[in-house]
């Protein structure tokens, strides 16, 4: 099949059509058959900038589909054929999208270069690809990950021992890899680091013994297990910049300074505005930012603040209502902080900062709804204290007066004093419902700008949710510190890839939905050369425009699949 260009010398016009040549057995000569007419070039130019190039591609696609159809007609089904436990006829193909991002980021080059001077008998890059792709497809133990390697159309010629060996090597590259990714993302997607988001979370280990990294601390999930802390910087697109692990007993507020120093030094970053929650709002951190010419946007607790700020919050003067649900006011205030001077003695220091106070009726209702469960438990605790202990009364105990626990067992002790529901405590807490405060060094930015900046913090909270729920980063079953570091490096790389994929798809889909769609793109071999696909959705079809990968075909030859995978490995950018 070819594009036929019929020129009429009388009119000077050219007509385009899809045609094929065939042998006429009657006249015993070659003849031409028109398959589809497209129209005159001069008319088509109103729709297509280059009609000939466009319809040449159309005809080539028609020809390929016709050949595919003829080949499929020749597939023979052997009804007596039996399955073999050694043959893996079902293959995963959705990873082609992940491979595209992986290679655009130059990860294949990074790991190939790192392996040049290593005396290893396996290809390091292939092990890393499996670990990253499976973390996004089917997160599981390293053993289970290894067992799935034959589900890929890739060279996976390595052993389980090689996987653990690679984990022992990767930790030494964690800093270099993060800088490499930053440079690639900055060049490919125009990353802006004038404004960065920061947060801390922790991951638990189902073990009893502690070491220098795995320590018992304040668990986000209220678990007694040893944990490690992770600090994470993220850009305004929601793509991770860098991470660092800290011992589990490290306070959240002690992590940002060392990470920020490394970020500015290793990533060649100038002035930044750090956005974080109230856990990082300390005198040390604020002084650190200001002394180095950086900025900050921190939330500020109203309940735990000084009396002067509380008086300002509850003074009705100065508020501006936005509609009937939201009110706001702000001021520039000389905040006094205590820092350690050069002589290691505490000293007072004044910093001008902008304080923004806002109240939301929706936040007010939400706070009361979130408290409702604890209040019901507190009322039940007063009536039936024997049903509870220190652990099970968590969240409700603060609303009960005269409550005492056995220090060893955690059981509630009977006392001469009657348990009483603390109505005063409830009323005091309700005063603060709906009120939020933000403090910032950015005095010239409007209240709306600051609030919009702070609201972007939800993306980093979502990133932690992705790592814990979708990538199943925890619990961590590894014991060696180098392999633990490598585990988190793999998870960080996987998170970066899925966030970039979200960005490439216009931010329309959640990471969970993208991962779910990609893991369903599988194919089954129906013939020695043909595979059949059985899943498509809005996300998989959107991949064609976003990445140039077409997941819409029901049938593909093995050659077609190899061509698509080869295309996914061609980097869109070379640094």
Image: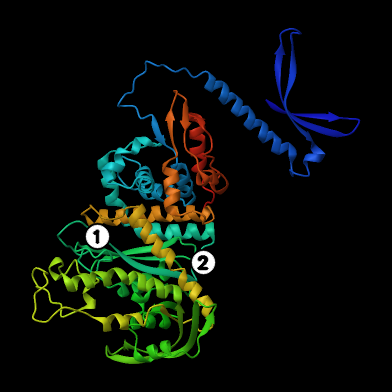
Q: Nearer the viewer, residue 415 or 440?
A: 415
Residue found at x 70% / y 16%: 22
Provide the secondary structure element on which disc 1 rests. Answer: strand
What x and y, as percent, mark residue 392? 19, 66
Q: Nearer the viewer, residue 97 or 326?
A: 326
* Label 2, residues with CA under 10 Å away: few <14, some 14-19, many ≥20: some
Q: Nearer the viewer, residue 337 or 307?
A: 307
Asked which quadrant contains residue 33, the reply is top right
Along the polypeptide, which appears first: circle 2 or circle 1?
A: 2
Which residue is the site of mark 2? Answer: 192
What x and y, as percent, mark residue 463? 40, 60
- Decide: is 410 above or below 427: above
- Decide: is 235 above or below 47: below
Gap in angstroms between the C-alphas marked 2 and 1: 33 Å
Which residue is the site of mark 1? Answer: 204
Asked which quadrant contains residue 175, the reply is bottom left
């Amino acid at each position: 099949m070819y594009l036929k260009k019929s020129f009429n010398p009388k009119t000077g016009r050219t007509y385009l059509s899809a045609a094929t040549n065939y042998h006429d057995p009657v006249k015993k000569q070659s003849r031409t058959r028109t398959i589809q007419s497209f129209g005159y070039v001069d008319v088509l130019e109103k729709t297509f900038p280059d009609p000939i190039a466009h319809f040449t591609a159309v005809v080539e696609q028609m020809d390929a589909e016709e050949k595919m159809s003829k080949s499929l007609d020749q597939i023979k089904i052997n009804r007596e054929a039996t399955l073999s436990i050694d043959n893996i006829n079902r293959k995963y193909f959705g990873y082609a999208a992940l491979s595209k991002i992986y290679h655009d980021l130059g990860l294949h080059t990074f790991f190939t270069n790192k392996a040049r001077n290593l005396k290893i008998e396996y290809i390091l890059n292939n092990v890393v690809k499996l670990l990253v792709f499976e973390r996004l497809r089917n997160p599981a133990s390293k053993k289970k990950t290894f067992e799935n390697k034959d589900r890929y159309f890739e060279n996976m010629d390595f052993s389980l021992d090689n996987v653990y060996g690679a984990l022992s090597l990767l930790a030494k590259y964690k800093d270099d890899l993060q800088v490499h990714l930053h440079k690639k993302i900055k060049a490919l997607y125009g990353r802006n680091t004038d404004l960065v988001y920061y947060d801390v979370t922790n991951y638990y280990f189902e073990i009893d013994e502690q070491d220098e990294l795995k320590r018992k601390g304040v668990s986000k999930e209220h678990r007694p297990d040893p944990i490690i802390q992770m600090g994470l910087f993220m850009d305004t697109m929601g793509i991770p910049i860098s991470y660092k692990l800290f011992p589990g007993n490290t306070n959240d507020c002690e992590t940002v300074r060392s990470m920020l120093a490394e970020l500015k030094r290793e990533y060649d970053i100038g002035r930044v505005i750090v956005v974080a929650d109230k856990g990082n709002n300390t005198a040390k951190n604020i002084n650190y930012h200001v002394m180095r010419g950086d900025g900050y946007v921190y939330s500020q607790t109203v309940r735990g603040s000084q009396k002067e700020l509380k008086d300002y919050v509850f003074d009705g003067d100065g508020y501006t209502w936005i509609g009937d649900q939201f009110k706001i006011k702000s001021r520039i205030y000389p905040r006094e902080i205590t820092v350690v001077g050069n002589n290691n003695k505490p000293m007072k220091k004044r910093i001008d900062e902008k304080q923004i106070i806002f109240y939301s009726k929706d936040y007010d209702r939400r706070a009361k709804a979130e408290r409702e469960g604890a209040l019901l438990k507190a009322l039940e605790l007063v009536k039936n204290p024997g049903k509870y202990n220190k652990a099970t009364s968590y969240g409700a105990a603060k609303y009960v007066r005269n409550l005492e626990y056995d220090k060893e067992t955690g059981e509630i002790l009977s006392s001469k004093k009657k348990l009483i529901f603390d109505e005063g405590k409830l009323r005091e807490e309700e005063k603060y419902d709906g009120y939020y405060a933000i403090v910032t060094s950015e005095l010239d930015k409007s209240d709306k700008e600051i609030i919009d900046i702070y609201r972007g913090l939800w993306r980093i909270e979502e990133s932690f949710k992705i790592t814990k729920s979708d990538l199943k980063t925890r619990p961590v079953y590894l014991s060696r510190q180098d392999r633990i570091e490598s585990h988190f490096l793999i998870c960080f790389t996987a998170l970066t890839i899925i966030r970039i994929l979200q960005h490439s798809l216009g931010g329309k889909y959640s990471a969970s939905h993208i991962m779910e769609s990609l893991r369903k793109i599988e194919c089954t071999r129906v013939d020695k050369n043909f595979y059949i696909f059985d899943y498509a959705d809005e996300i998989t079809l959107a991949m064609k425009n976003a990445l140039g990968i077409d997941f819409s075909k029901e049938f593909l030859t093995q050659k077609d699949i190899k061509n698509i995978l080869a295309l996914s490995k061609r980097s869109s950018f070379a640094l």
